[in-house]
Amino acid sequence: MDAELARRIASHPKYQELKSKRSSFGWWLTAAMMVVYYGFILLVAFNKEFLSQRLGDGVMTIGIPIGFGVIVFTIVITAIYVQRANKTYDDLADEVAKAVLK
């Protein structure tokens, strides 16, 4: 990439807005994922009795749906990020490209 083009992109106000929005949202999603994942790991480490309780008469324990919930949560926050990227970030990126590449 041309150094002058990179400088123009980096100094454009819409690019700064895009970078700020994407970064702060990414940190929120990261924090949410860490709370869910490490919460599950802490349950495994310190409360095995709770996770090993059986659900009904079968072999399924409480830990299985909670572990599945961690996986589903990951998919959901990925979908939320993709939706935000398609609606907000792509529009800002297009505005930057149109302004800088004229």
Image (spheres, helix red, strand yellow):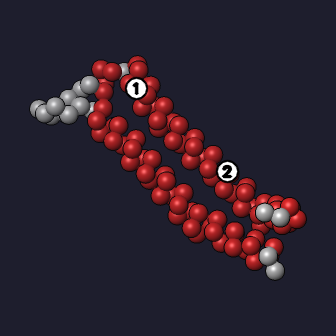
Can residue 47 be seen by looking at this rendering?
A: yes
Element type where label 2 sits in the image: helix
Q: Is 45 located above or below residue 96 in the figure?
A: above
User: Residue 58: which disc?
Assistant: none
Picture quarter containing residue 51?
A: top left
Q: Quadrant of the C terminus?
A: bottom right
Residue 44 pos. (x, y %): 38, 24
Q: Is 86 located above or below residue 101 in the figure?
A: above
User: Residue 24: which disc?
Assistant: 2
Picture quarter containing residue 56?
A: top left
Residue at image x 69%, y 69%? Answer: 92
Tell me the kind of residue under disc 2.
Answer: Ser
In the rendered view, does 16 fall on the left or right side of 74?
right
Q: Earlier in the sequence, mark 1 or mark 2?
A: 2
Q: Is 50 located above or below residue 35 in the figure?
A: above
Residue 65 pos. (x, y %): 29, 39
Can residue 11 be seen by looking at this rendering?
A: no
In the rendered view, does 20 fall on the left or right side of 57?
right
Element type where label 1 sits in the image: helix
Tell me the kind of residue under disc 1.
Answer: Leu
Q: Quadrant of the N terminus?
A: bottom right
Picture quarter containing residue 96?
A: bottom right
Give the crowd class for mark 2: few <14, some 14-19, many >=20 residues within 10 Å: few
User: Residue 43: which disc?
Assistant: 1
Residue at image x 42%, y 31%? Answer: 40
Q: Nearer the viewer, residue 91 or 52?
A: 91
Residue at image x 44%, y 25%? Answer: 42
* Residue at the outermost front position: 1
Residue 33 pos. (x, y %): 51, 41
Q: Is 10 located above or below residue 53 in the figure?
A: below
